[in-house]
Image (tube, rainbow, N blue to C red):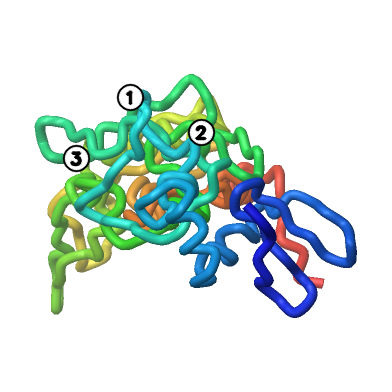
Amino acid sequence: MSYIQVLPKVEFDPATNKIRSGGQERDAGFAAIGFSLNPEVREALAELYGDGGRAAQAGSIGTEAGGRADSPWAPYDGPVDSRDAVPTGIGLLTSSGAPLIEISSQAAANVWDYTGPASRNPYFCTSSNPLRTGYVKGYDNWFEAVNLLGPNGYVINSSYTANQEGAAEALRIVRQFVPDATLTASVIGEGTASPWRSDKAINEIELPNGERVNAGRVLAGYYNNGMGVDSSRDALMRYELALHTGEQTINYG
């Protein structure tokens, strides 16, 4: 396969995944995804691999059986990088229809070589498997309806009202960073003179110093409201928990 002009001063060889510019050659890396949209490149990939070159682009993305992992409930048909893998175990549900999270013993391969906790989650997302609405199958079944009773009462936003299954997953997430965290719950308004009271206890995660974190908000934050988990979630969760434990403070300058 010969080089194809993809930019005024850049040529790309789909067969070797190389870039040539100014007489110098190098690996195309992630840029190959953008180049694959070029009509001439797509035609060349089709000649090499068939199916518009998608099999070549998919590379290592697949399940243990060797095929690309599919998520028909939240499809993605965009370009992929052969260095990104989709973790196994997506789409599994418990008897209640909530997500069954089976953490892998190994990090899913990714272009950033990220190996933090998120990379072992079945819903780990990369540029080749991006965050998208509904990707975490059964996500809504981690939550329950809770009413706030009193003057002009209302149903509390469900992202704050994780059920027992959801709270258990929130606890697992937090324990990745604070191993001694425990599960607790409280009724809004109980023991106070407030005219408002929740009709169910709200599940929370209690940290060793007594600080509490809403379990539903842990799920919503870590799973991007059901869109999946990306590498930034670990850093954000670690930072937020450090604020609660006093290990980190905000400098307002």
Residue 62 % position (x, y): 39, 35
Q: Residue at x 36, y 56 (%)?
A: 227
Position of the C terminus, as image quadrant, is: bottom right
Which kind of residue does numbered mark 1 sit on? Ala
* Position of residue 7 in the picture relative to residue 108 (left or right): right
Residue 29 % position (x, y): 67, 51
Residue 38 % position (x, y): 54, 71
* Position of residue 249 in the picture relative to residue 193 (left or right): right
What residue is disc 3 on?
A: 98
Which callout, 3 or 1, points at the residue further toward the start of the chain? 1
Secondary element at tag 3? loop
Can you tell which quarter of the image residue 87 is in? top left
Q: Which mark is on residue 65?
A: 1
Q: Do the residues labelled 1 and 2 touch (CB within 8 Å)?
A: no
What whole-number distance in Å separates the C-alpha atoms at marks 1 and 2? 15 Å
Q: Using the image as rendered, state which of residue 209 and residue 74 is in the foreground.
A: 74
Which kind of residue does numbered mark 3 sit on? Ala
What whole-number distance in Å separates the C-alpha atoms at marks 3 and 1? 25 Å
From this viewpoint, which residue is outermost toward the left? 95
Residue 34 % position (x, y): 57, 66
